[in-house]
Amino acid sequence: MLKNQILIYKQSQSKKRVKKKCKQCGKAFEAKRADSMYCSNSCKQKAHQQRSVEKEQTPVEPNEMQAFYLDEYQMTECEMSFITYCFARRSLVYNATIDQIKDYFNLIGNEKWTWAELNDYLTGIKAFNEFNERFHNNEFTIYPNRFTDGKDIYGVEMLS
């Protein structure tokens, strides 16, 4: 009895076809499944190829800063080395104000460490050593000035 009910249910489901429009070619078709999006395997493959090409052509934004500024480093008046400054600075948005940078560095130092102790600590961290190697291989750009005439190169007014 149960087998017959299952067979009848499967037969009734297989006869239900949904009218859809192919997302690739726009042609109307009867879908065998409710989640079908394409009228044929060739349309499905063409759509996949287009998505792959679009993905390759989309520029990828670097997730860390690639350039640093000497005048910005000097304005923060921090006592850390330039390499340590760059390592820490890369975590902030590229157009951070000097006050934001100082606040961030105060959180790092937070009176638990001297800057010399922080430098010593960082040399034992793999991420810092990798950054240091990339830095010395000239994978980052160092500019002399971010600020001129009270504004930075991003158009942000210099607040400090």
Image: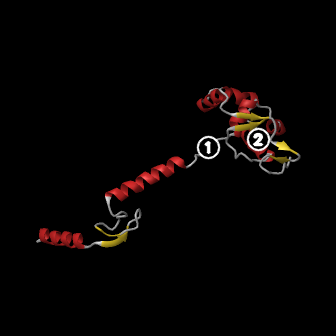
Q: Is residue 159 above or below residue 89?
A: below
Q: Is residue 44 above or below residue 107?
A: below
Pinpoint residue 140: horizontal percent, then vertical percent.
68, 33
Q: Residue flagged by tag 1: what amino acid is it? A: Asn
How far apart are the two marked residues, 1 and 2, measured between alpha carbons? 23 Å
Say which mark, if any, is on residue 81.
none
Residue found 26% across the figure and 73% down from its top: 16
Give left or right: position of 34 versus 141.
Answer: left
In front of the other: 59 or 107:
59
In what element is the residue under mark 1?
loop
Pinpoint residue 108: horizontal percent, then vertical percent.
71, 39
Q: Earlier in the sequence, mark 1 or mark 2?
A: 1
Give left or right: position of 98 versus 52.
Answer: right
Pinpoint residue 96: horizontal percent, then vertical percent.
75, 47
Q: Residue flagged by tag 2: what amino acid is it? A: Asn
Residue found 80% across the figure and 39% down from its top: 72
Residue found 63% across the figure and 29% down from its top: 134
| Quarter occupied by residue 79 | top right
In what element is the residue under mark 2?
helix
Give left or right: position of 121 versus 9.
Answer: right
| Quarter occupied by residue 117 | top right
Residue that label 2 marks: 106
Residue found 50% across the figure and 52% down from its top: 54
* Mark 2 neighbour class, 10 Å CA radius: few under 14, some 14 to 19, many 20 or more: few
Residue that label 1 marks: 63
Pinpoint residue 135: horizontal percent, then vertical percent.
67, 29
Give left or right: position of 61 versus 56.
Answer: right
Position of the N terminus by quadrant: bottom left
| Quarter occupied by residue 92 | top right
In front of the other: 53 or 12:
53
